[in-house]
Image (cartoon, coloured by chain):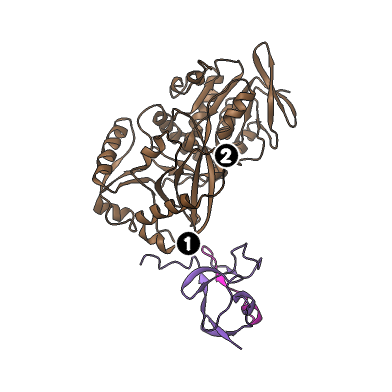
Amino acid sequence: MSPDVLVIGAGIIGGACAYSLAAAGLSVVVADRAAVASGTTGAGEGNILVSDKMPGPELDLQLRSTELWRQYAEDLAGKTFELEAKGGIAVAMSLGQQEALAELSRKQAAAGVDVHKVAAGDLLKLEPHLVPDVVAGRLYPQDMQVQPMLAAAQLLAAARRHGARLRLATEVLGATVASSRVTGVVTTQGRISAGWVVNAAGPWAQALSQRLGAPVPVSPRRGFILVTEPLPPIIRHKVYSASYVATVASSSAALQTSTVVEGTHSGPVLIGASRERVGYNSTLSVPVLRQLARGATQLFPVLAQVRVIRAYAGFRPYSPDHLPVIGVDPRIDGVVHACGHEGGGIGLAPATGEMVAELLTGGQTHVSAEPFSPARFAGGG
Amino acid sequence: MPTFIFDGRAVPFEHGQSIAAALIGAGVITLRRTRRRNRPRGLFCGIGVCFDCLVCVDGTANRRACLVAAREGMVATMQSGTGLDDLGD
């Protein structure tokens, strides 16, 4: 029997879509060409951040998503995904950064973000190992972290308890179309018919969208993360340089790095963040790793005594206007996009899944869906 | 025979032998204690992959005993937890 909805992609976005859709009573199949969390979901830090978002549609989606993450932690009690409400700290290292941070945080507060000014002296109480010459900082208590692979797996497991089915090692080759409606897909494991096909293919969303006849311009933006040896709990929050927000918002293809440092439940400290658009090339780049390490030791000098045990690369699904692509495709019936979240997909996943379910069941959406509509890429194609 | 020190005890070794091999030869199989539950750990893969045989060598934590060649006068200790508890003090 063909399902109401076929979700392509078993990462955090596909998992959240499947959970919301199945919980809404729809029959769901999730297909992935590889395995659960085998793409971007398994290559990040698990950030759920309000702090790095400027006021606008993405922040609105994040505020709803942050609420949902807290709710999911209760709904899925006992199915841990290491949700940790650790809080984020943005630090300014110069007077220029201080002014930019002050202005950003003022606008964020007006948009509903919980943000507190922290004087330089008090920063050292929050983070004793922080370099003493920071000028000022802001504390964002709403910032959280999850173990993203566990979270994706738990959402998929929850969806399965509502009847969803999972088809792994199943790659979509093309669409089946009848009367200008996509009625399903042809895969390496045969045909799957469905009422709707959801494109949750992360950085491969463009290739999938082309196969479905509904192209959206999502491309990979590479990032590296350094992992230290396990340490005692010396870094308590997610701590980052105030320049991070500008880096996230940039559209440059060239390498950009800004310092992001955080401890983890299991001991290693994670160090990011780099951004560059180099296609799907995942070769390690020593100059990038060096820049990340230098930035981290400038923020936390104690890290100079610590060894990095590994580094990894991942691809963020980059959308050219920095907004996720969520909604029904206007060009061909039967296709729904849920992609283009760049580095914020873990944080934005629950509200994305909720929005997809609301759109397909004809309900009112919690967050206005219009700014995310794929219609913005449909003209002139 | 040359020796190195492990937890205050002189351990003999053949030239080229790893710390882990020399310690097993001397009957020592517990090389560290785990971070959370203080459980004993020792040589497991023996080829530098599993990171189970971590010891402190001349003040540096997290050295793989199976990969570090023993040297005369080296001072090694059993690693407790991360081995970095005094970090930043």
Residue for point 40% across, 61% down: A304
Q: Which residue is nearer to you in this view: A54 or A277?
A: A277
Residue stretch in magenta: B23-37
Mark 2 and mark 1 in contact (Cβ < 8 Å)? no
Q: Dot 2 lies on which element?
A: loop
**Disc 2: host chain:** A
Q: Is residue B35 magenta?
A: yes
**Image-quadrant location for residue A299:** bottom left
Residue lying at the far top in this picture: please name it: A179
Residues packed near mark 2 inside 10 Å, few (<14), some (14 to 19) or many (20 plus):
some
Residue for point 43% across, 67% down: B85
Q: Which chain is brown?
A: A
Vertical arrangement, residue A51 with respect to residue B32, above or below: above
Q: Dot 1 lies on which element?
A: loop
**Image-quadrant location for residue B4:** bottom right
* Residue A271 in view in this figure: yes
Q: Which residue is nearer to you in this view: A64 or A290?
A: A290
**Disc 1: host chain:** A
Q: Quadrant of the N terminus of chain A?
A: top right
Residues packed near mark 1 inside 10 Å, few (<14), some (14 to 19) or many (20 plus):
some
Vertical arrangement, residue B27 with respect to residue A152, above or below: below
Q: What percent of the width, then of the height, locates residue A324?
A: 48, 28
Q: Which residue is mark 2?
A: A280
Residue lying at the far bottom in this picture: please name it: B1
Q: Which residue is mark 1?
A: A307
Residue for point 46% across, 49% down: A288
In this structure image, what is the colour of chain B? purple
